[in-house]
């Protein structure tokens, strides 16, 4: 096992700056996720750790050793590819044992380790099958076993679940996380799925346009995003332009709100849809109350999502466990001061946006 | 400090020592065996000899005739090829499979076989012209050559145009019909425009082949001078090496021009026409006014193909062609006594060169796909260049380059093997490049990630996955090698004779029966090879879904 340290790494492809001065510490035995939209540089970063690309500048250190100039086959990393990249002309056993053969492991030990690895990922009696005969989920497990069997210092996963259907995706990601914890292996995981990133990671590194935006625990990323991109990319958020008054009060349009800390100057308030309560009547003791009008509603089972118009601005509000009672018409939005996250950067000219528009 | 940082960087750029070695080997052999002989041909004659070309009436005539035949035979072969390909692309054409198979047959035959068979069938002693119709026909000359080249080369057009037509999504036809187009309009506005790049590609390929055609021309053109045959007459009759070099240099000007046109212009368009495959729906039925004329056309073409085989087969067993039709095995005895050893030689040369071709082609494709050293485009050019060179050019090139020290290979089997190997490299190379494109890069990365070095990746991943293209390349090269005449006529001596040359001598000496018997034997070998290869591919490659 080993930690991974990226020190100011930069990678260009022609005129495009794919990775721009990224520094990241991945602790030994941790599960770190690189999260971002496509083209943000997350896969390039992962591939530099694996050794498929050399960084143009900066250093990659694995377990205390600088590995910049080591080719992939000399690094103790193992990767699970998005398309699995199973060798189509080899059986499951041959696929999984490939890395061991490259390392000259003796036949008896090899057989034992391959079986252990297959058992670990929950596959039995498929040794002699070819990958084309397996289901997508099984292929995924073979790819995982093939990476784990060489006991890599670092396990690299490049969107390993994107070819699975939605239900299987949730199951396999939990399995991968449990396995990683049990083996205590260092894992670097790439995904564009923010829910997946939150669900499995010790730490999430959000990237955009080649740059790191924030590195923190899932809780931190979700509740205290460092900038508007992170807040917007991870989960849904209402963005409200406001003006700090110096005390724990801000002015947002016609309304004044109480917030958790003192602020001055222009700020953006970030409000997660579930941080806002929706009430049919104004409750007497509430601190921050805004009147609004429900424009649209979408029932999602565990929650009901409302699009509410407040003074010409559209808010998204989630009501958990909605049961059978649906709200409509005039309502009141109630916000607890400590649930308001404040970004000191001011949103440009954009009005608070609704990433998901209501279905009409 | 700077020094220590430099060294690993350099190591990374040079990469794997095995890969570097492969790169150097491939570059080296291509330079020595493709570039060097080509250079030898062009630089052999003095500049004054090139400048004297306009004064040489025979060569000017040969050039004019070659271009004339190119236009004529290309036009007819492409037209026949298009009609035939269109007909066999209709799923409801009666006997469609059989017609498709039939059009492939000439591709496996020695290139001079059509001419030989037509002399037997339509010549002065012709089974059809004289014995059946009682006519006195002189088939020798440009008209005979025109017919022969049309029949011999239309299958290339069928192959290319057929692929393009098959790739046209039937949904487009349905859509056009749905929008109100009649049958003729669908053909005119949909099928024809989409097939146009395929037709252009076919025309260029056929044109190159016609220009380079030696076997048919030498048998049937008679006193009609052509560049391809003129080169051989220069050497065979006059031992005029530099004259031959001038003539083949004249020949490569149009062939290379056509080749470049094909590479940079047509093949790019071809791909855009082939993309966009949806789910297959059956094609709409062909209307009767189309179907029956198409069937008739196919039957006529099929007749001309079958005549080739019937002619040679009959020739091998008829006692005295044109006079005595009693069946006999005498010709076989003569053929095997005189040409048996040569046939064995052909097989050795064919197998050796086919193996070498496939290995070099695969290695070259692997190395050029790396894009690591920046010289890959040069390598790529060298690997496809021989496709633009007529056999007679290669033949003269090897005669000039490898007949004397430092490369004294004259009279050995090696000079034949090497010449044929490098002439065929483009076929194997293109098959391997196409095969490599099918393999996702991540599979190679997975192997590297698990600890396989550069050449190990080639061995463990690419070799097994490219067995299909490898086998196809082997079979194509083998068939082309054992049936080749245009190169070997320049390189054989009494010590390294091969079957095709013996057949040519037998025809020249009037031993038609023995020549037909030996041709039949050669044909049998190629057909058996193809069948075996088809069975091998049909069995499916391990782990890969058979398509």
Image (cartoon, coloured by chain):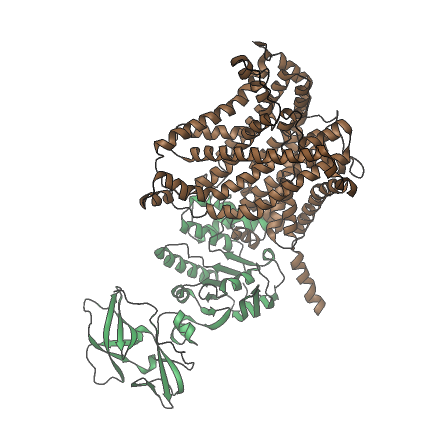
Chain colours: A green, B brown
| Viewer-nearest residue: B55 or A36 | B55
Q: Is residue A225 above or below residue A130?
A: below
Q: Position of residue B195 (x, y in %)?
A: 46, 42
- Label count reads 0
Which quarter of the rendered picture does the N terminus of chain B lie within?
Answer: bottom right
Q: Position of residue B116 (x, y in %)?
A: 60, 22
Which residue in the rendered view is the most extreme toward the right? B405
- Give x and y (percent) for residue A325: 18, 69
Residue B350 image point, x, y percent: 64, 31
Q: Is residue A352 left or right of residue B37?
A: left
Relative side of B415 to A252, left or right = right
Q: In front here: A39 or B104?
A: B104
Residue pictured at 37% horizontal, 38% vertical: B184
**In this picture, is A93 found above or below A177?**
above
Of residues B194 and B402, the one nearer the viewer is: B194
Would residue A109 be visible to someone looking at this image?
no
**In front: A250, or A29?**
A250
As drawn, which residue projects farthest toward the bottom?
A246
């Amino acid at each position: 096992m080993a930690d991974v340290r990226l020190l100011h790494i930069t990678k260009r492809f022609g005129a495009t700056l794919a990775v721009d001065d990224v520094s990241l510490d991945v602790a030994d035995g941790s599960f770190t996720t690189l999260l971002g939209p496509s083209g943000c540089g997350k896969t390039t970063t992962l591939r530099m750790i694996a050794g498929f690309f050399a960084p143009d500048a900066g250093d990659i250190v694995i377990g205390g050793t600088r590995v910049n100039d080591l080719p992939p086959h000399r690094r103790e990393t193992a990767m699970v590819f998005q398309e699995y990249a199973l060798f189509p002309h080899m059986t499951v056993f041959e696929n999984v044992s490939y890395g061991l053969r490259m390392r000259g492991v003796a036949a008896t030990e090899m057989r034992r380790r391959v079986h252990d690895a297959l058992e670990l990922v929950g596959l039995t009696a498929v040794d002699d099958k070819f990958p084309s005969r397996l289901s997508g989920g099984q292929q995924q497990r073979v790819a995982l076993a093939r990476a784990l069997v060489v006991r890599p210092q670092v396990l690299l996963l490049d969107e390993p679940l994107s070819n699975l259907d939605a239900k299987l995706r949730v199951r396999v990601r939990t399995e991968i996380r449990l396995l990683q914890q049990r083996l205590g292996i260092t894992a670097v995981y790439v995904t564009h799925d923010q829910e997946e990133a939150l669900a499995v990671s010790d730490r999430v590194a959000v990237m955009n346009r080649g740059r790191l935006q924030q590195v923190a625990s899932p809780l931190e990323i979700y509740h205290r995003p460092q900038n508007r991109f992170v807040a917007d990319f991870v989960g849904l958020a209402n963005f409200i332009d406001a003006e700090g008054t110096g005390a724990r009060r801000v002015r947002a349009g016609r309304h004044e709100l109480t917030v958790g800390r003192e602020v001055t100057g222009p700020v953006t308030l970030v409000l997660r849809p579930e941080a806002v309560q929706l009430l049919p009547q104004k409750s007497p003791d509430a601190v921050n109350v805004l009147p609004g009008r429900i424009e649209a509603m979408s029932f999602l089972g565990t929650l009901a999502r409302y699009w509410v118009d407040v003074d010409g601005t559209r808010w998204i509000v989630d009501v958990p466990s909605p049961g059978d009672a649906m709200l409509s018409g005039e309502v009141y939005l109630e916000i607890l001061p400590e649930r308001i996250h404040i970004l000191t950067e001011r949103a440009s000219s954009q009005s608070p946006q609704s990433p998901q528009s209501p279905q009409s | 400090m700077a020094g220590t940082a430099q060294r690993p960087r350099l190591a990374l750029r040079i990469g794997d020592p095995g890969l570097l070695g492969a790169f150097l080997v491939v570059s080296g052999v291509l330079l020595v065996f493709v570039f060097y002989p080509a250079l030898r041909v062009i630089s052999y004659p003095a500049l004054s000899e090139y400048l004297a070309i306009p004064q040489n009436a025979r060569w000017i005539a040969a050039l004019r005739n070659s271009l004339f035949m190119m236009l004529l035979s290309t036009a007819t072969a492409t037209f026949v090829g298009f009609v035939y390909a269109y007909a066999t692309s209709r799923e409801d054409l009666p006997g469609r499979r059989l017609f498709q198979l039939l059009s492939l047959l000439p591709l496996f035959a020695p290139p001079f076989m059509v001419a030989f068979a037509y002399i037997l069938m339509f010549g002065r002693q012709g089974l059809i012209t004289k014995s059946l119709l009682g006519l006195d026909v002189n088939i020798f000359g440009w008209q005979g050559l025109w017919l022969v080249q049309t029949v011999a080369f239309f299958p290339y057009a069928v192959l290319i145009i057929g692929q393009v037509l098959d790739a046209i999504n039937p949904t487009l036809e349905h859509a056009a019909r749905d929008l109100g187009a009649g049958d003729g309009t669908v053909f005119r506005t949909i099928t024809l425009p989409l097939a146009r790049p395929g037709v252009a590609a076919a025309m260029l390929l056929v044109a190159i082949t016609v220009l380079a055609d030696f076997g048919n021309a030498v048998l049937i053109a008679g006193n009609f001078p052509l560049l391809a045959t003129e080169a051989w007459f220069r050497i065979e009759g006059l031992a005029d090496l530099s004259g031959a070099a001038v003539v083949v240099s004249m020949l490569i000007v149009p062939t290379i021009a056509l080749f470049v046109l094909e590479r940079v212009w047509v093949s790019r368009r071809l791909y855009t026409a082939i993309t966009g495959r949806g789910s297959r729906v059956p094609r709409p039925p062909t209307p009767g006014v189309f179907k029956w004329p198409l069937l008739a056309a196919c039957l006529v073409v099929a007749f001309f193909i079958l005549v080739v085989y019937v002619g040679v087969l009959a020739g091998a067993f008829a006692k005295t062609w044109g006079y005595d039709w009693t069946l006999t095995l005498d010709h076989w005895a003569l053929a095997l006594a005189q040409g048996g050893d040569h046939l064995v030689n052909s097989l050795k040369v064919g197998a050796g060169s086919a193996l070498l071709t496939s290995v070099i082609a695969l290695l070259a494709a692997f190395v050029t796909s790396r894009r690591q050293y920046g010289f890959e485009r040069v390598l790529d050019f060298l690997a496809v260049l021989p496709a633009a060179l007529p056999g007679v050019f290669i033949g003269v090139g090897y005669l000039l380059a490898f007949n004397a020290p430092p490369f004294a290979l004259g009279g050995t089997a090696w000079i034949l093997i090497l010449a044929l190997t490098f002439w065929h490299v483009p076929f194997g190379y293109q098959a391997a490049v196409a095969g490599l494109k099918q393999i996702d890069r991540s599979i190679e990365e997975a192997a590297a990630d698990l600890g396989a070095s550069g050449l190990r990746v080639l061995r463990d991943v690419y070799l097994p996955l490219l067995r299909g293209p490898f086998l196809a390349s082997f079979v194509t090269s083998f068939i082309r090698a054992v049936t080749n005449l245009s190169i070997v006529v320049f390189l054989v001596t009494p010590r390294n004779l091969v079957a095709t040359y013996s057949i040519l001598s037998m025809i020249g000496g009037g031993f038609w029966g023995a020549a037909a018997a030996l041709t039949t034997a050669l044909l049998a070998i190629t057909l058996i090879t193809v069948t075996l290869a088809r069975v091998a591919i049909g069995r499916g490659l391990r782990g890969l879904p058979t398509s």
